[in-house]
Image (cartoon, rainbow, N blue to C red):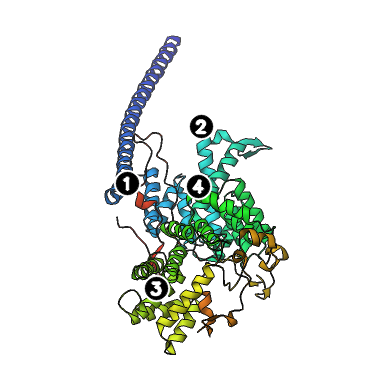
């Protein structure tokens, strides 16, 4: 009996041993098959990743060469295979070429799978009213820019330190916080995004809201636009020259070019500070030396015309330099001087050419009025009254002098006489002999309370009137540089009253300027920064084609976006 028990136990032991061996063999087989499976999967995945990366690289290369059609094809194929970088480049290509709904889809797709560069695209789209749900407008744009800037800053700092993004956080009381270098870099990136987005706005209220919100979030590139807003005032801010000067001075300390122009005008007119013509002239002159600023050139040309010993030759040269920079008021001034300072046929033809350039190429409203009068009178070329009159009607909708001229013509007043009187008054305004108002040409004198809409006086510190100018300044810089506004009703030409007082007001740029204007910017196409090429790509950094980065109008026609075909 005992022997039988021993045999049974031995058999059970052998069975257990055999089962263990079978189990081990099975596990080895399973592990082997698993290894084969994952090896195959790795090969397939690597091949797929390499394939979509290759497609993306080819698309980016073609894009940098300006081949938008084939670039989009390769990038689309890569995006369909899940390549995030391809999605981001497609979003950037679409928004930069005016295909905004397509840009929205690719940008949303990219951000959902970890894309970092498409937040700026989404912000620009929000500004023009393209977005998912309620993600539209200035507030949405700021939110997208903040998110994108922070993510890009974390990624950049992590790459510099050679660590994962999660390893950057500083844990305080159990809460992860970004280190100081990430925060400062995020502010810098956010500021750049904000700065690039400013030309996209078409609505003053949205623009103002965007500026104020971005400033509250730490954007450090808004001193000039904030100063401009305080200078002219709007529905959100009451005009305040002291605040304008404060922001412009901050911008000057950062070396921003436009701030020097602003401060030159402020010194010239005495806004929130003592009038200081010498400092203004030095600032204008430095701007000319550094960047041939056309507004500074125009200002110095006017000052030269109004000295105690006027320098007409210098003024004309400065006007020409400004006109060469595309500044319409300078071309208009050259046309006026050509017709009033000389009388030969060549001067008449030159004047007509300057007025045409100012009107048709540089969109100066004063030049447009003069050119229409030349067309209607036949001065310098064949008479074309219908063309000139039709355009004058268009101009009259927004410009009072043109409206008055239309009324004169409808009373059968000879257009040549209207032109002649307009030129005489234009000449006297340019020379400072006659003034129809004082101060900066682009700063309105009538203010309205942002809340009630009622007319209110400007702050006391806002402007030093020319009647209060120190006589020593007039003696040094020329009395005509500080002309007290004329009594237009008493003005005559050869003892004959003017046909209309508004003929004096045709020259809009009647004095040296700060360069500030009321919000009337023509919206431009979004120009976000291009995505960064990943480090594991075999191609070098991406160089965008010129047509996707150069400024272009947002609208090709009313209600129709400008688009580039691809």
Q: Earlier in the sequence, mark 2 or mark 4?
A: 2
Where is residue 160? Give x, y as percent: 51, 32
Residue furthest front in the image: 309
State which quarter of the image contains the N terminus: top left
Q: Residues within 10 Å of mark 4 (few under 14, many from 20)?
A: few
Kindly give the residue lying farthest to the top in the view shown.
3
Rounded to the nearest angstrom, the CA distance separating label 2 from label 4 is 36 Å
Residue 179 visible in the snapshot = no
Instruction: Tell which tag, 3 or 1, sits nearer the viewer.
Output: 3
Q: Which residue is mark 2?
A: 160
Residue located beneath label 1 in the image: 63
Whichever of callouts 4 and 1 sits on the residue coming sooner in the sequence is 1
Which comes before the other along the chain, label 3 or label 1?
1
Q: Which residue is mark 4?
A: 290
Task: Estimate the spatial distance between the alpha carbons at disc 4 and disc 3, rounded to whole Å.
Answer: 33 Å
Q: Gap in Å between the C-alphas at discs 3 and 1?
A: 44 Å
**Which of the 4 image quadrants contains residue 537?**
top left
Mark positioned earlier in the residue sequence (1 or 2):
1
Q: Would residue 554 be found to the left or right of residue 165 on screen?
A: left
Q: Disc 3 marks which residue?
A: 371
Q: Residue at x 46, y 71 (%)?
A: 366
- Secondary structure under the numbered disc 4 in the rendered image: helix
């Amino acid at each position: 009996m005992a022997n039988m028990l021993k045999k049974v136990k031995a058999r059970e032991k052998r069975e257990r041993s055999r089962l263990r061996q079978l189990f081990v063999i099975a596990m080895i087989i399973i592990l082997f098959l698993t290894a084969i499976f994952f090896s195959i999967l790795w090969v397939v995945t690597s091949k797929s990743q390499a394939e979509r990366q290759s497609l993306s690289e080819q698309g980016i290369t073609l894009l940098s060469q300006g081949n938008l059609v084939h670039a989009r094809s390769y990038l689309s194929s890569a995006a369909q295979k899940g390549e995030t970088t391809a999605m981001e480049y497609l979003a950037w290509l679409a928004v930069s070429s005016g295909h905004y709904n397509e840009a929205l889809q690719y940008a949303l797709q990219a951000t959902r799978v970890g894309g970092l560069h498409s937040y700026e695209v989404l912000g620009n789209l929000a500004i023009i009213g393209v977005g998912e749900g309620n993600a539209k407008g200035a507030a949405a744009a700021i939110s997208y820019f903040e998110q994108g800037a922070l993510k890009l800053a974390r990624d950049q700092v992590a790459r510099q330190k050679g660590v994962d993004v999660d390893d950057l956080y500083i844990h305080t009381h159990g809460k992860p916080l970004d280190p100081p270098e990430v925060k400062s870099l995020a502010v810098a990136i956010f500021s750049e995004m904000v700065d690039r987005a400013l030309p996209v706005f078409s609505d003053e209220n949205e623009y103002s809201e965007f500026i104020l919100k971005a400033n509250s979030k730490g954007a450090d590139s808004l001193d000039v636009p904030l100063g401009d807003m305080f200078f002219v005032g709007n529905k959100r801010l009451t005009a305040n020259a002291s605040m304008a000067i404060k922001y412009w001075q901050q911008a000057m300390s950062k070396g921003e070019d436009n701030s020097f122009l602003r401060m030159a005008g402020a010194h010239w007119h005495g806004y929130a500070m003592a009038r200081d013509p010498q400092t203004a002239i030095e600032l204008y002159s430095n701007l000319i030396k550094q960047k041939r600023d056309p507004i500074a050139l125009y200002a110095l040309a006017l000052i030269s015309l109004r000295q105690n010993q006027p320098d007409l030759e210098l003024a004309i040269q400065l006007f020409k330099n400004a006109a060469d920079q595309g500044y319409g008021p300078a071309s208009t001034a050259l046309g006026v001087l050509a017709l009033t300072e000389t009388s030969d046929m060549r001067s008449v033809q030159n004047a007509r050419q300057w007025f045409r350039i100012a009107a048709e190429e540089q969109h100066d409203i004063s030049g447009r009025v003069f050119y229409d009068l030349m067309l209607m009178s036949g001065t310098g070329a064949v008479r074309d009254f219908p063309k000139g009159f039709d355009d004058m009607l268009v101009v009259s909708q927004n410009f009072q002098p043109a409206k008055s001229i239309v009324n004169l013509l409808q009373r059968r007043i000879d257009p040549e006489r209207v032109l002649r009187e307009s030129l005489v008054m234009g000449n006297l305004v340019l020379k400072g002999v006659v003034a129809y108002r004082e101060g900066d040409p682009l700063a309105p004198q009538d203010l309205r309370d942002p809340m009630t809409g009622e007319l209110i006086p400007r702050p006391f510190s806002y402007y030093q009137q020319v009647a209060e100018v120190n006589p020593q300044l007039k003696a040094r810089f020329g009395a005509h540089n500080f002309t007290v506004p004329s009594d237009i009703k008493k003005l005559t030409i050869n003892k004959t009253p003017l046909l209309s007082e508004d003929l004096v007001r045709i020259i809009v740029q009647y004095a040296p300027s700060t360069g500030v204007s009321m919000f009337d910017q023509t919206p431009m196409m979004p120009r976000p920064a291009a995505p960064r090429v990943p480090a594991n790509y075999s191609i070098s950094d991406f160089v965008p084609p010129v047509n996707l980065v150069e400024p272009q109008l947002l609208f090709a026609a009313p209600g129709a976006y400008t688009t580039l075909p691809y």
